[in-house]
Amino acid sequence: MHIENTKFFHIHKHNSPKWFEGARLSFGIEPNNSWRAFEMARRGITNPKSNEIYTIDLVALRALEFYRKQKPKDPRLTFYHHDPVVTLAETLDSLFLATRMVRELIFEDVRRQLYLTLPSRTSCIWLIPEDPRAVRFWLDNMRGDFKKVYRVNATGEMHRATQQIVMGDTISMGDWRKRAVDYWNGAKTESYDDEILLNGDIEVLEEVPI
């Protein structure tokens, strides 16, 4: 859907000097911050003395063997904390990242096959409805400590979808593909917690106090 000068909110998670009142920004060609984060992501445990990185799956497996008293501590991981609760948190964080990567690759594959004219999640900007309930919902559900809310004026190609579709865990690739089709078909009824993808231009109107 093409829109002209339509107001939305945007929650920004990066402390960027490009975002200020009156700024004009374009999206839809270059990879966005979320996609660049996937390409640069390295999830592992770093030895503070050697800077060698050990993957989470290796560390979790060796820690589990130690917790079960099946094996002694791995001599490569003598620096590791071996706290079961922290190990679980580290493993879940890595699993969350891997799940998101699978989801985004499948969503983009389905978009390119069936919905090529719609904005790509790899290069769009995410917007939310101009509704205080939307701001509260996304502030409570977005990861990360740094968040700023902006009111923006948007022009370009928009796609509005139900965000619950992307909320999945370790489901099959087939299930993700079915969800992708539903997602790209768009929201059947509009809700304040929808997510909005835009390829186009925005003008930053103001920063909104949180």
Image (cartoon, rainbow, N blue to C red):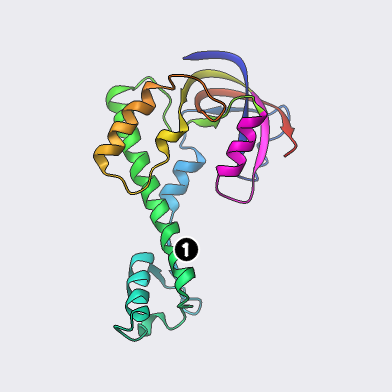
Q: Position of residue 188 (x, y in %)?
A: 43, 19
Q: Is residue 69 above or below residue 155?
A: below
- The residue located at (38%, 56%) in the rendering is 95
Secondary-structure class at tag 1 = helix
- The residue located at (64%, 37%) in the rendering is 136
Q: Is residue 120 visible?
A: yes
Q: Is residue 4 above or below residue 122?
A: above
Q: Which residues are magenta?
A: 132-152
Q: Position of residue 141 (x, y in %)?
A: 55, 43
Examine the image and state in which quarter residue 70 appears: bottom left
Q: Position of residue 155 (x, y in %)?
A: 57, 18
Q: Is residue 122 visible?
A: no
Q: Quadrant of the C terminus?
A: top right
Question: Quick check: 175 left or right of 134?
Answer: left
Asked if the stretch drawn in magenta spans residue 148, the answer is yes
The three-letter amino acid code for the residue at tag 1 is Ala
